[in-house]
Every structure is written in C-alpha cells, then in structure tokens.
Image (cartoon, rainbow, N blue to C red):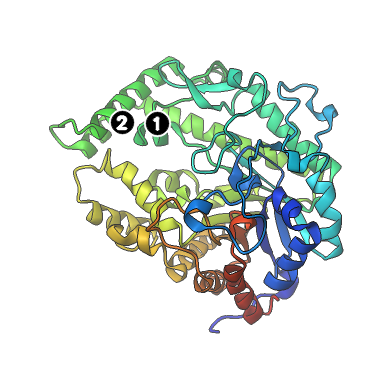
Amino acid sequence: MDFAKPDPSEKFVGIQVSPISFIDEGVDTVLDTLKDRVGVNVLMLGTVSWLGLKTGRSISHKLDGWPDHGVPEPFTMKGGAYFEPDPRFYANTMIKDFRATDPEMAGIDILDLVIPAAHERGMKVFPELMEPFFKYAGHGSANTIEVPNLPQVMETDCYGRLKDEPSTSNPDYRRWMLSMIEDQVRRYDIDGLMWCNERNSPLDQCIQGQAPGDFSEATLDEARRRGVDTEGCRRAMIALHEFCTSARAGEAFDDGAFIEFLRTLMRHPEILIWERFWLERNKDLDREIHGLVKWCKPGLSFGLNVWNRNHFNIFRRAQWPWAEQTMYADWVKPITYQHQSGEIWHKEFGFLHKSILRDFDAGEAAAVLSRMLGLGAPPLASAVQEGMDPDTYVGGQCADALRGVHGGAKVYMGLGIDAPRVREDQAVCTPDIAYRSVMATYRAGGHGVVLSPNYASMKLTNLDGVATALEELGLK
C-alpha cells in the first residue's frame, strides 16, 4: 500500500438499500450481513420513491440474474412513502396521501423498523431521496402513480404541451417535497440525509431530442419576478429545438452542425438566459432543502448525491462546479458506477454526436471530450464492453472532486456494485472491480464510499471485494 491508511474513527462506508430488503431478509439478517460481512456503518435508506432502483428489488434481473440473497421474484412495487407521513406536515400541500400501498409493506414504517436495530449496532441511518420521484426512465418506475391531481403540476414545454415530470417551480409540488423532508427530519432519530437532483436542463432536453421546458405558469411567474423576458426566451428555445431537430434528422448546414449550433446561440442569446434561469432555480431546490434540514436540526449531516452526467457532459461540467456545492452540503457523493459507466458515457456522447458533433468522427471526438473531462475513458467502440477502469475513473473523479471542494466538504465516492445493466454485452461487476474501486478512492484521498445504487441488486460475492479492501485499509 503506497498511501496512508484512513482514520478508522472517521470511517464512512455507506450503502444504498431498499425497504423491501428488510422485509425479504429480515432486519437483523440485513444489518448483520452489511456490518459484519461487508463493513458498512451507514445505511442510505430509500424512504419515498416510485422508482424500483430506490425502493424495489433488482430492476435488471432479466439481464443480470438474481443476487445471492433476498427474494428472487419481481416486486410489483406501487411506490410512495415507506414511512408513516404525519398529516400535520401536509396541511398546505396538494399531495397529502402518498403512503405506499405495497401489500408487503402494510402497517410497516421502515424508519421505525430499521433505526433502533441499526443504532444498536453502531450504524447510522440516512434517508435517501431522489428527484425525479416519478416515472424516471431506466430506474424501474411504477406503472401507475396513484397521486390525485399530480398531472396538474406538470412541466410545460416551449409549445405549451404538458411534459412528463412535475414542475419543481410549482409551489404545490415544491412545498410537498419540503414538507415530506421536514416530516422525516423532525420526527425520526435519523443521522443525516442524502439528496439527489437529476433533472435535465432545457439545453439537455434539446440535445436529447426533446422539446425543452419548463414554461408552466408557475415557472413563468418566477422568471418574470427575476426580470426575465419569458416570451423572448420561449421563442429562442423553439429556435434551438428546431435546430436540434434538423441536426438529428441529418439536414445539411452550410458551415456544419457545430457552427450552426453556435450561430443559433448567438442569434438567440435568450437561450442561455433561460438555461441560466432554469439552472439557478434548480439549484435553489438543493439550497432550500439544505437550509430546511439545518434549521430543523443544525447538527444533522446533509449530503448531495451528484449525477454522473455532471462529469460526462461538457455543459453540465461547467454548470455544476464543486466549490459552489460546498455552500449547501457537508459532503458530496460523486456517482461513479464504473462497470456500468462505459454504456452511460457511450449514451451521453451519443446525444452530442447525433446533434452538434454529428460531422466529426465519433471515436476521435469522444477521445477529445474524454481528455477535456479527465475521464480516462476507453475507446468509444469498446466502452460499453470494457466499462470504466476503477483506478483511472474512480480515482480520477475522486481527485477532481477533492480539488474542486477545496476542503469545504467531504468526498464520499459512489461506487457501483452490480449497478443495473441495459445491454447483454455491457461490462459486469466483479469482486476485483469492487476492490479496486474502494482502494482507488482512498488512494486519491477520498473520505469514504457509498455502495450503490441498491443492495437488493448486489451480489454478496462482489461485496466481498469491498470487504477485502476495507480489511486492508483497517476499516473492517
């Protein structure tokens, strides 16, 4: 070992875990396995979600098979709150009744069930929450969302059509999120909270082939209060959408797609005004939640689960500097699901290559972007099959985050253990990948790890790779 061992008194080895795992296997079994076999001392517990990735069983069992623990059957998850919401906190919200109705969880408050047993073992419990909560592609969303009037708070695109996610600027929806978090923070003996915000910006949406938002009345009102010419921005975003649609369709441009993209931005500077407004409003949500948690319980630990698109996308990399996030987080968790991430990088680059970079050779352009972003990605042609190398990718992203936070926040690396695959030829997790990812984190100077995205899909044999690393580091 060519680096100093971490201080065991500051150990932070977290794992994201579904409520259903405690029902399937029993609270004592899960906690003893995680603590004694793996070395986990922090539970990131999914408490409110309509996404199988957060509160269900494995969502990729058809490709990956079932893990060597739990119940090897699909879970017909309905979603909602897996704790018992207190009506006092929802008097001023439109969403009042959102208790999960999964029969397996009937009469069970997952926080009441898990917290005492975890604390007896010296383990901490953090609710883990992620926005979007509903119908998030690739996250095992519930088929139906039984929340009355939810469609009335949806985003609106630049053409006035309802989109498929609630508007975070809608006061009813935003108030519900804050109320739901306040309910958990005030009433339960939790040790912290992890928040994740994975919303696509208007520019993201355009490049991905969608009509951009959010032009709902609530968002327009907020923009006008900030002095934004909303109609000018709407027309500008239509122009950007028209360009992206034409580029993706293969239409010829006199100076190529990339120059035409820049020309569109320069002709319609309101594109960047709207993008900046949306970005600040989105960050406001993170800041408000941080402030709420600290107002209720000043000493409670609050961390940000940070989307890997922020380091795979040049625009988002510029928009989400680490130093800024330390103003409203005690720690950050960069998502680096190494074996899965070759496919994610391939997909993320593909959005750019189908639109603004379509005139460039894919392999050459991807290599340039990888160097710009410091990814150390394999050649694009083999990225899906190889995945990302733990030593260069996890270690490099950890070093980037540490450099970016300037000591203002801890860095707990989000390591993928059997993160769900979407392709048969996609790289798979192994004990060696798990081992090397942990070692790369501490070699780079990271303060801890969070095993992700869901214990219900993790093979114990791969978690053994984590345990081996922790033993060598003196953390187990």
Task: Say which element carries label 2.
Answer: helix
Q: Nearer the viewer, residue 97 or 126?
A: 97
Quarter of the view holding residue 232:
top left
| Residue under pointer 1 | 272
Question: Tag 1: residue type?
Answer: Leu
Residue 448 placement (x, y as % from top left) = 63, 65
Residue 354 image-quadrant placement: top left
The percent coordinates of residue 416 (x first, y second) are 54, 60
Task: Report the residue at 61% width, 36% height from top.
Answer: 133
For the point 72% across and 60% down, the residue is: 42
Compared with 343, 201 (above or below) is: above
Marks 1/2: CA–CA distance:
7 Å
Badge number at residue 318: none
| Residue of label 2 | 265
Q: Residue at x 46, y 63 (%)?
A: 428
Q: Are marks 1 and 2 in contact (CB under 8 Å)?
A: yes
Q: Earlier in the sequence, mark 1 or mark 2?
A: 2
